[in-house]
Amino acid sequence: MALIVADNIHKDYQVGDVVVNALKDIGFEIEPASFVSFVGPSGSGKTTLLNLIGCLDKPSSGTLMVADTDIARLDRKESAAFRGRHLGFIFQDFNLIPVLTVYENIEYPLLMVQNGPPADRKGRIERLLAAVGMTDQKDKYPDQISGGQKQRVAIARALVTNPELVLADEPTANLDSQTAYAVINLMKRMRDELSTTFIFSTHDQKIVGEAEVIFRLEDGRLAAKETKGGASHG
Ligand code: ADP
Ligand code: MG
């Protein structure tokens, strides 16, 4: 059973008198525990598509099933609950809370959901700190760690609620290429360990090769799907 099924998705933005067709007839399936990239130049629709899958915006038409839920039908409150239960997010500019420590940043999403007794929470945070190699830095504040370290904290934060799916919009755009590889490979290792599906967007042709499934976007259309076993066009 696919984790995500998109069928004939269109997304239009109205800007004054002009309609921008940001996504056109997008259809695909993504299996659980996949490691997926959406790649395409700036303006090709990557953020728009991630926002739809992330239940942050709605398609103009078409159906989008995520974890067996028709997410276009959810109202605001249901969308927020769905995100809390099923999704984790990683951002280009890390979005750590500056007044919280590394530990507290990872803990933060757990305070938003009812998620077991405090002792269990502490154990989960400590396991994730170790998994992303940040145990020694747990009492530091975001401005005391590097960009790559911030993104490792953000990966742990995205995973702390045990989501099925983590969405990362250009997570390496503010990192040098060596750190970018390390961050992508850390996400892949977390997928291996936790079977969490990861989808990251990028316009960087080098790191996209680390993905196992690649969807190429061109001008709002899905131009190609490539998998490690071969490519199919259409
Ligand atoms: P990418 O993330 O690949 O750079 P986007 O999804 O941000 O692409 O944008 C796709 C297209 O939709 C672009 O033409 C962009 O200008 C347009 N667009 C994105 N967001 C909005 C918005 N909120 N209002 C109007 N147009 C938008
Ligand atoms: Mg974008």
Image (spheres, grey):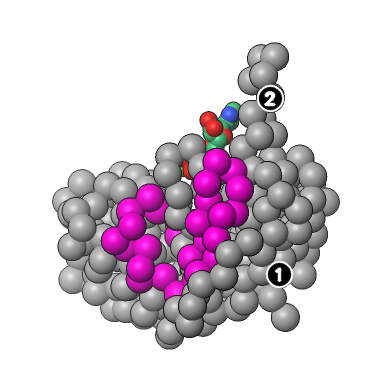
Q: Which residue is mark 2?
A: 19
Q: Badge 1 local density, few (<14 within 10 Å), some, or many (20+)? A: some
Taking the spot 37% from the left edge, 63% from the top edge, the residue there is: 208
Q: Quadrant of the C terminus?
A: bottom right
Q: 22 or 151, which lies in front?
A: 22
Give the amino acid type for the residue marked by disc 2 in the picture.
Answer: Val
Q: Could one spot residue 100 in this view of the protein?
A: no
Taking the spot 20% from the left edge, 46% from the top edge, the residue there is: 143
Q: Could one spot residue 200 in this view of the protein?
A: yes
| Residue 102 shown left or right of residue 76 in the figure | left
Q: Which residues are magenta?
A: 198-226
- Residue 18 x, y percent position in the rendering: 67, 19
| Residue 5 shown left or right of residue 181 in the figure | right
Give the amino acid type for the residue marked by disc 1 in the picture.
Answer: Ala
Q: How many marks?
A: 2
Element class at badge 1: loop
Residue 193 lies within the magenta run: no
Taking the spot 59% from the left edge, 54% from the top edge, the residue there is: 222
Q: 16 or 231, which lies in front?
A: 231
Element class at badge 2: strand
Q: Which residue is mark 1?
A: 67
Residue 202 lies within the magenta run: yes
- Residue 84 x, y percent position in the rendering: 62, 60
Asked whether disc 2 touches disc 1, contact meaning CB atoms under 8 Å apart, the reply is no
Sequence-first disc among 2 and 1: 2
Outermost residue to the front? 233
Q: Quadrant of the N terminus?
A: bottom right
Q: 17 or 57, which lies in front?
A: 17
- Residue 124 x, y percent position in the rendering: 43, 77
